[in-house]
Image (cartoon, rainbow, N blue to C red):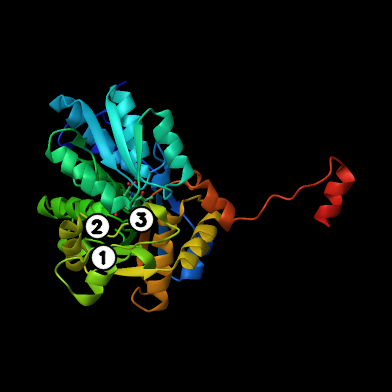
């Protein structure tokens, strides 16, 4: 297949190669959500739905570059630790490249759709009796010893691909409004996207393609039960303290040690952004609100909208702001969360009158 020039690879000039192992990825929708915009109370609101990538999350943008690098290096085995989406993307892109993949998952804490993907795309799946951070510790050690090639977001080539989220948001806003968004709100786990978007904007500023004052304020959202970045931003600390115990319905961002924090914290600070923590209940409310406009996302993704709403209520975000929220993964990734947030199916007799009676 030749997907050069499409999606992520439309931005080849900003990437280390001109083409990758592609399915293809990128070019995701920037949805309008008029009712949500009205209820949150901002000037403009668009949803960059990364769940519309080939494996249903933004991870594909990183893997198309990262797996290409691995193939170039001639490594034998690709590996990642994952809360689920990275493992699904690595399995698919590894399969595409005909390479062996190994994924380490926190046992019992990965949504069903993601394990199903990793399984069918033929990754070797190891379920670890520990959280994501423990899985990443192990994979990092394997990579250091040369047993595997690491494709977590610690791998800088992943972040190169993920920069294209920022390029697409800026282009989309400029095409529709002639201006750039004031703020980009995104869920934060390992803070890879935060770091990648910051790098994308720095490169555009350095190339005189974006004014220093036009850089959107990077605004990170974490779940209250896994919010080490928020803690650091709120306290003004230079380093992020690792949380050993983490818990949230948004299992994708159930992370206590955001490994890209050194790259992401300056991004939040230097763009005039901030970080905020939201409850599981606020996440589910936001997931329902998005679904009510036809945009189906997994819980971690809805955190961005929940965070925006909270910051607007606090007056941190102004009513006249133009905002883009990133939704990072598709609804089908986590069917259990969707069932829990949505209405239950109703049993009915095989009879038209019985159906009609229920409608009254
Ligand atoms: N949203 C979703 C749906 C994710 O899967 C992740 C990370 C994030 C947000 C956080 O992004 O790390 O760039 O801040 N998932 C990783 C995984 C950890 O293993 O799938 P980040």
Q: In the displayed structure, would residue 129 be above or below residue 314?
A: above
Q: Image quarter for residue 223?
A: bottom left
Callout 1: SS = helix
**Ligand 1: does it lie within 8 Å of the C-beta at label 3?**
yes
Looking at this rendering, what residue extends furthest in the right direction? Answer: 353
How packed mark 3 is, by other alpha carbons closer than 10 Å (few <14, some 14-19, many 20 or more), is many
* Mark 2: few/some/many CA within 10 Å (<14, 14-19, 20+): many
Q: Give the number of the disc on residue 253.
A: 3
- Marker disc for residue 229: 1
- The CA span between labels 2 and 3 is 10 Å
The residue most toward the front is: 129
As measured in the structure, the alpha-carbon distance from the residue carrying label 3 to the one carrying label 1 is 12 Å
Q: Residues within 10 Å of mark 1 (few under 14, many from 20)?
A: many
- Horizontal side, residue 172 vs residue 52: left or right: left
Work out which residue is located at the far bottom of the displayed protein and give it. 315
Q: Is mark 2 within 8 Å of ligand 1?
A: yes
Task: Name the N-terminal-most of marks 3 and 1.
Answer: 1
Give x and y (percent) for residue 247: 39, 61
Q: Is residue 38 above or below residue 175?
A: below
Compare marks 2 and 3 and give the one earlier in the sequence: 3
* CA distance separating discs 2 and 1: 7 Å
> Which quarter of the picture shows residue 359?
bottom right
Question: Which of these two is toward me, 212 or 153?
Answer: 153
Dot placed on the residue nearer the N-terminal end, 2 or 1:
1
Tell which of 159 and 189 is nearer to you.
Answer: 189
Q: What is the number of the mark on residue 357? A: none
**The C terminus lies in quadrant:** bottom right
Q: Secondary structure at mark 2?
A: loop
Determine which residue is flagged by label 2.
258
Vertical placement of 31 versus 34: above or below?
Answer: above
- Residue 224, image x, y percentages: 38, 68
């Amino acid at each position: 297949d030749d997907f050069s020039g499409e999606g992520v690879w439309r931005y080849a000039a900003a990437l280390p190669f001109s083409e990758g192992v592609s399915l293809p990825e990128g070019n995701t929708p920037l949805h309008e959500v008029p009712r949500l915009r009205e209820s949150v109370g901002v000037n403009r609101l668009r949803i960059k739905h990364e769940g519309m990538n080939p494996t249903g999350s933004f991870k594909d943008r990183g893997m198309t570059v990262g797996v290409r690098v691995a193939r170039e290096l001639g490594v034998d085995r690709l590996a990642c630790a994952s809360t689920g989406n990275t493992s699904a993307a690595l399995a698919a892109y590894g399969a595409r490249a005909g390479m062996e993949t190994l994924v380490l998952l926190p046992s019992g804490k990965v949504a069903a759709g993601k394990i199903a993907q990793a399984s069918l795309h033929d990754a070797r799946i190891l379920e670890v009796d520990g959280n994501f951070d423990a899985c990443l510790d192990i994979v990092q050690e394997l990579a250091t010893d040369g047993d595997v090639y690491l494709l977590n977001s610690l791998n800088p080539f992943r972040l190169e691909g993920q920069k294209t989220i920022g390029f697409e948001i800026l282009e989309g806003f400029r095409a529709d409004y002639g201006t750039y968004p004031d703020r980009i709100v995104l869920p934060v786990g390992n803070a890879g996207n935060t770091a990648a978007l910051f790098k994308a904007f720095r490169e555009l500023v350095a190339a005189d393609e974006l004014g220093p004052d036009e850089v959107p304020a990077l605004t990170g959202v974490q779940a209250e039960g896994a919010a080490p970045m928020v803690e650091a931003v709120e306290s003004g600390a230079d380093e992020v303290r690792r949380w050993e115990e983490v818990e949230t319905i948004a299992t994708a961002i159930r992370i206590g040690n955001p490994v890209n924090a050194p790259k992401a914290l300056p991004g939040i600070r230097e763009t005039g952004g901030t970080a905020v923590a939201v409850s599981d209940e606020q996440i589910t409310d936001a997931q329902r609100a998005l679904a009510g406009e036809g945009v189906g996302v997994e819980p971690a993704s809805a955190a961005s909208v929940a965070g925006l709403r909270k910051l607007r209520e606090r007056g941190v975000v102004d009513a006249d702001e133009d905002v883009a929220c990133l939704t990072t993964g598709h609804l089908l990734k986590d069917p259990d969360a969707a069932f829990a947030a949505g209405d239950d199916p109703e049993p009915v007799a095989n009879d038209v009158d019985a159906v009609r009676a229920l409608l009254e």
